[in-house]
Amino acid sequence: MLQFIAQPYDKYSIPEQAQMAIEAGCQWVRLRVNDMPDHELRELATELVPLCKEAAIILTIEDRLEMAKELGIHGVHLRHSSVTPAQAREMLGPEAIVGVQVTDTAQAEALRGLDIDYAAFPPEASLEAITLCASRLQAIGMAMPLVAEGDFGPIAARHAIDMGASGVAVGKSILEADDPVAAASAIINSLTAA
């Protein structure tokens, strides 16, 4: 699974980024727009939410719970939020997606018993940390998908899966490619083959 991280970027608008992800076969777009004012996000959502719904892909947003609820976005990725995962679930309801960024196995284990859909490791986390976490969670009977975030290409993305990740989250390395659609598609093909 590829989470494409759409974010402000000088070469492509966020709707253009989402369209490229859709063309590549991506099934999940994660918005990273923490500094965007609410009125601009509402304006963006008028184009982005229908685009994602029409393509039947998941759309989540980092940390902006109130806006996720207001705009009908599928869920949130708690990255720098002061809101706890339990509060996010209560606020957004049982159908929403709630992902949580963690930096180590202890933080992932602390999510046990909470209604969380996945845990994500930031780019600075090593793949060995993900392997250790996946092994530990399996040993305690805790089934939780782990997402590795980083500037992955196809081979590195496949390696992340081999090391225990369930998926990868990639943004800038796709956007900086000569052909972002081909770059995203190559990652998706690599993950599908894993």
Image: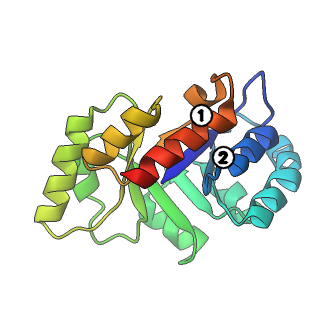
Label pair 1/2, CB-CB below 8 angstroms: yes
Please tell me which residue lies in front, 76 or 138: 138
Marks 1 and 2, how far apart at CA: 8 Å
Q: Which residue is rendered at x = 37% and y = 42% of the image?
A: 158
* Farthest residue, direction left: 139
Camera-side residue: 194 or 20? 194
Residue 147 spot, x, y in % from top left = 39, 49
Q: Quadrant of residue 69?
A: bottom right
> What is the x, y in percent for residue 31?
65, 45
**Residue in the foreground of this view, choosing between 45 and 147:** 147
Q: Is residue 79 something one can see in this rendering?
A: no
The color scheme shown is rainbow
Disc ID at residue 24 = 2
- 126 left or right of 19? left
x then y, percent, for residue 110: 25, 58
Name which of mark 1 and mark 2 comes first in the sequence: 2
Which residue extends farthest bottom? 94
Q: Tag 1: residue type? A: Ala
Identify which amino acid the numbered label 2 is placed on: Ala
Q: Residue at x 87, y 52 (%)?
A: 47
Determine whether, in the image, residue 151 is placed left or right of residue 35: left
Does residue 161 lie above or below 89 as drawn? above
Q: What residue lies at 67% left-to-right and 61% top-to-bottom?
A: 57
Label 2, secondary structure: give it: helix
**Horizontal placement of 70 versus 43: left or right?**
left
- In the rendered view, would you say 145 is above or below 43? below
Name the residue that disc number 1 marks: 183
Q: Is residue 6 visible?
A: yes
Work out whether residue 186 or residue 140 is closer to the camera in this orientation and state it. 186
